């Protein structure tokens, strides 16, 4: 039975309406790109309101128990809420084009199919059948350590996080942070300012960088800084499924 989450306007046209050449350039240059106002405030509230409803989720993770940080999150079960399922389908082909270009530049043979359903079929044939989209909840003092969401042999190299709460009104602190470890250089940090409904697409693991001697790989991790007050909800869209 599908979860009928509020959809204020069709998902595919709003995703198609972004300047994907500019977003691709941002991803190339910095490892992340912001999709402003991807969701409406009403859609954000509706997705966040699912958090206490256990029937929508397959597992509940307390970060402190695993050394991941402090806070908690829940992985959705299939079927996903309509809105998140539609976003996953619509975002994937745009990001797959970026991923294929990156792999070609890094000398990685893997290429991703144009349609998400084809990629998911490959995941399932490899034994990765558990859905990975998730809903995260932070209260004062919570944070998410720097990490990478890989989950199996087949891992899509980009993902999307959508801020469901409004900074300054619903919470303070809790900035999205991306770090980039460069060979023989100091690490670089990127703090991404988001408002309610904004999404950030970002590299999960590696991305190519053009240097004076050719292309090299940099290693990325992402996390969330300490929430200082209030309640912060985020939806995470991961495109591969897990074992």
Image (cartoon, rainbow, N blue to C red):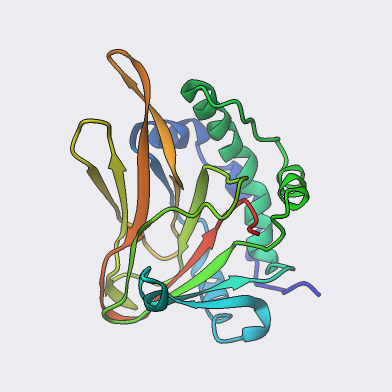
Residue 229 located left or right of residue 237? left
Q: Which of 73 and 29 lies nearest the eye of the viewer?
A: 73
- Expressed as whole percent of the image width and height from the top left, the position of residue 42 reads 54, 73
Q: Is residue 177 visible in the rendered structure shown here?
A: yes
Q: Is residue 214 above or below residue 122?
A: above
The residue located at (50%, 53%) in the rendering is 160
Q: Which of 198 and 88 lies nearest the eye of the viewer?
A: 88
Residue 51 located left or right of residue 182? right
Q: Is residue 169 visible in the rendered structure shown here?
A: no
- Expressed as whole percent of the image width and height from the top left, the position of residue 7 reads 65, 66
The residue located at (64%, 30%) in the rendering is 111
- Expressed as whole percent of the image width and height from the top left, the position of residue 233 reads 44, 73
Q: Quadrant of the C terminus?
A: bottom right
Q: Quadrant of the N terminus?
A: bottom right
The residue located at (65%, 64%) in the rendering is 83
Quadrant in the rendering for residue 203: top left
Q: Residue furthest left?
A: 186
Quadrant in the rendering for residue 113: top right
Q: How many marks?
A: 0
Q: Residue furthest top?
A: 213
Residue 134 located left or right of residue 221? right
């Amino acid at each position: 039975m599908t979860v009928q989450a509020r959809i204020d306007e069709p998902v595919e046209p709003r995703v198609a309406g972004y300047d994907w050449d500019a977003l691709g350039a941002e991803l190339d240059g910095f490892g992340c790109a912001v999709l402003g106002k991807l969701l409406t405030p009403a859609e954000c509230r509706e997705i966040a309101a699912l958090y206490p409803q256990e029937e929508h989720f397959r597992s509940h993770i307390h970060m402190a128990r695993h050394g991941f940080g402090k806070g908690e999150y829940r992985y959705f079960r299939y079927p996903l809420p309509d809105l998140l399922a539609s976003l996953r389908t619509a975002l994937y082909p745009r990001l797959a084009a970026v991923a294929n270009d990156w792999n070609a530049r890094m000398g990685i043979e893997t290429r991703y199919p144009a349609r998400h359903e084809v990629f998911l079929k490959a995941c399932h044939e490899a034994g990765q059948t558990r859905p990975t989209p998730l809903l995260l909840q932070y209260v004062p003092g919570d944070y998410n350590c720097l990490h990478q969401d890989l989950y199996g042999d087949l891992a899509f190299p980009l993902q999307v996080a959508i801020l469901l709460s409004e900074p300054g009104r619903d919470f303070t602190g809790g900035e999205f942070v991306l770090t980039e470890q460069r060979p023989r250089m100091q690490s670089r940090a990127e703090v991404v300012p988001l408002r309610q409904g904004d999404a950030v697409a970002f590299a999960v693991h590696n991305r190519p960088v053009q240097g004076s001697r050719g292309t090299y790989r940099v290693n990325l991790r992402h996390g969330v800084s300490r929430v200082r007050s209030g309640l912060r909800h985020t939806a995470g869209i991961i495109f591969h499924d897990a074992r």
